[in-house]
Amino acid sequence: MKATDDKTMISNLLFAGTHGHVIAMDKATGRTLWATSLPRTGYSVVSIVLEDGLLLCASGGRVFALDPTDGWIKWTNDLPGMGTGLVYLSTAQSGSQGGMELLTAQAAANAAAGSAG
């Protein structure tokens, strides 16, 4: 598959993570295309960032890089000595728009839209 085909396919996906699992769904139909269990994460919340052809995920104190086209785990970092709690992800491209910052921004936007309408 060509890189442009991969980009087109990825742009049609919705990624969701919960309880130590990540799934990819077709945005148009909601059909699950693949599901991956993140090893040794228990039932932890999953943080997700899609960037540079990698689906970066964190759960249970571990970080994973998945192939967004099929869910294959490319690498894992156990974050030694950091515990097993919630992990937020951020990169130079994604900025700090993850975790609670994103939820706060979405809540503010929803409140503003509600008062304007």
Image (cartoon, rainbow, N blue to C red):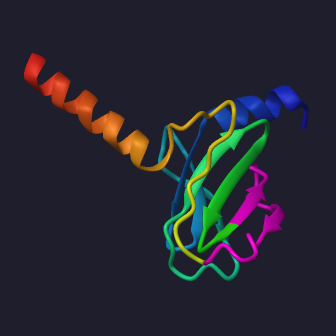
Query: Residue 74 magenta-drawn?
Result: yes
Q: Where is residue 17 in the image (x, y as percent from the top left)?
A: 53, 60
* Residue placed furthest toward the right: 2
Q: Which residue appears at 70% of the width and 52% of the height?
A: 56
Left or right: residue 108 compared with residue 25: left
Which image quarter: residue 57? bottom right
Question: How many numbered discs?
Answer: 0
Can the viewer see residue 112 in this picture?
yes
Which image quarter: residue 72? bottom right
* Residue placed furthest toward the front: 81
Q: Position of residue 28 (x, y in %)?
A: 49, 38
Q: Where is residue 106 in the image (x, y as percent from the top left)?
A: 32, 36
Residue 7 sits above or below residue 67 on the image? above
Left or right: residue 15 compared with residue 82: left
Q: Which residue appears at 26% of the width and 38% of the height?
A: 107
Residue 42 sits above or below residue 106 on the image? below
Q: Which residue appears at 70% of the width and 49% of the height?
A: 55
Q: Which residue appears at 57% of the width and 62% of the height?
A: 87
- Tell me where the magenta segment starts and ends, as one range: 63-83
Can the viewer see residue 117 in this picture?
no
Of the pair 9 and 57, the residue shown nearer to us: 57
Q: In which quarter of the image is the N terminus?
A: top right
Query: Residue 68 magenta-drawn?
Result: yes
Which image quarter: residue 10? top right
Residue 36 sits above or below residue 90 on the image? below
Q: In which quarter of the image is the C terminus?
A: top left
